[in-house]
Image: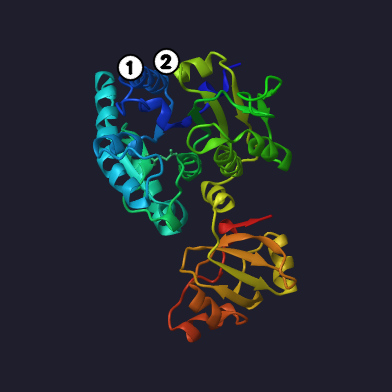
Amino acid sequence: MRDRLSAARRVVVKIGSALIVDHETGQMRQTWLQSLAADVAARRAAGQEVLIVSSGAIAVGRRHLKLSQSDLRLEEKQAAAATGQIRLAHAFQEALLPHGVTVAQILLTLDDTEERRRHLNARATLQQLLDLQALPVINENDTVATSEIRFGDNDRLAARVAVMIGADALILLSDIDGLYDADPRACETARHISEIEAVTPDIEAMAGAAATGYASGGMVTKLQAAKIALAGGCHMAITDGRVERPLQALADGARSSWFLANATPRTARKRWIAGSLKPKGVLTLDNGACRALQNGRSLLPAGISKVAGRFERGDLVMICNGDGAELGRGLSAYSSADATRIAGFKTSEIENILGYRGRDEVIHRDDLVLD
Ligand code: GLU
């Protein structure tokens, strides 16, 4: 049986700052990066598609700007990222050059992975790059992202990218070889967990206990990433990336924790709907519409009794029954303003009310995921 990494068709590899940047000198760790480049080239030669999500912009840039204090303000981080990102991208380009691989830089914000129209744009660009055999190297667009609209950690960004692009494996290269039931640096009897099928409260409690002392993000954001990945049908591994050729080491059986997505196939769009972070509004349905949805039908305007929140066409909304219980989530074909006007009316009346002929359904069943 092939190992899980080698069995994947499309792989997202997330690289933590500590691996790529020397903490003492602020320099890129060139030898390690070259070994990773060899790994990536080998995967591609074996027919796998690879995308990289790399941290390190802030860690590299702060050095050049002589920002030595440990707690940087947001503006300082943004300045550091602006300085460091160009160096980070250059380092990838140089490392992949001997393998004949073209590197493409993509900088994303939270909205680019959440807001449907922008999500679709980002996805189309990534797909195009893969079709053209380029290697996307992705980071958060730290220079424009303010605190409210910032991921802040690349674990979740990488998971979001993996789901967005329909990857079947996400590999978090970290400074720890997986999840333990206690902090292994503090507790000798900490037990390593090699396979996890769901991020249950018990699993989350382990991360809480083990969070301190880990590098950026810690185990908490890794578990959040696992939830996003699993909801999108993507397996995720945490492994120690500090060794040379870390992907080969993982394929050869290096210690790791694998979070295993259940095998149910979903369409790419449904994957994203299920994994999305932030619904923009709530549609409350009457009983008839609740039943229709459970029977696999689309949501028509007639079944909507209340529209709350502000959203645009294409945004994610939550769907609730009359008691306020969540039934699921979906992409609305109408803005909140238009949905409010057509709520309770027949589909045939949409054109008269709005002055244009929109979609018959407010949420098409293909854009709907029930809990
Ligand atoms: N985007 C940040 C950077 O490139 C890193 C975020 C993280 O460490 O996860 O410096």
Circle 1: residue type: Thr
11 left or right, relative to 3: left
Image quadrant for the N terminus? top right
Where's residue 237, x and y in %? Answer: 56, 29
In the image shown, does 115 or 59 lie closer to the viewer?
59
Q: Quadrant of residue 136?
A: top left
Secondary structure at numbered mark 2: loop
Identify the residue at image location x=25%, y=34%.
87
Whether ligand 1 has any atom under 8 Å from the Cβ at mark 1 is answered as: no
Q: Is residue 323 visible?
A: yes
Tell me, yes or no, whether the two marked residues, 1 and 2, touch with CB atoms within 8 Å: yes
Label 2, on which residue? 244
Label 1, on which residue? 31
Q: Is residue 198 visible?
A: no
Please tell me how crowded label 2 is: few (under 14), some (14-19), or many (20+) other residues with Cα within 10 Å.
some
Where's residue 274, x and y in %? Answer: 59, 51
Image quadrant for the C terminus? bottom right
298 left or right, relative to 65: right
In the image shown, does 165 or 351 lie closer to the viewer?
165
Secondary structure at numbered mark 1: helix
Q: CA distance from mark 1 to mark 2?
A: 8 Å
Residue at the extreme front: 69
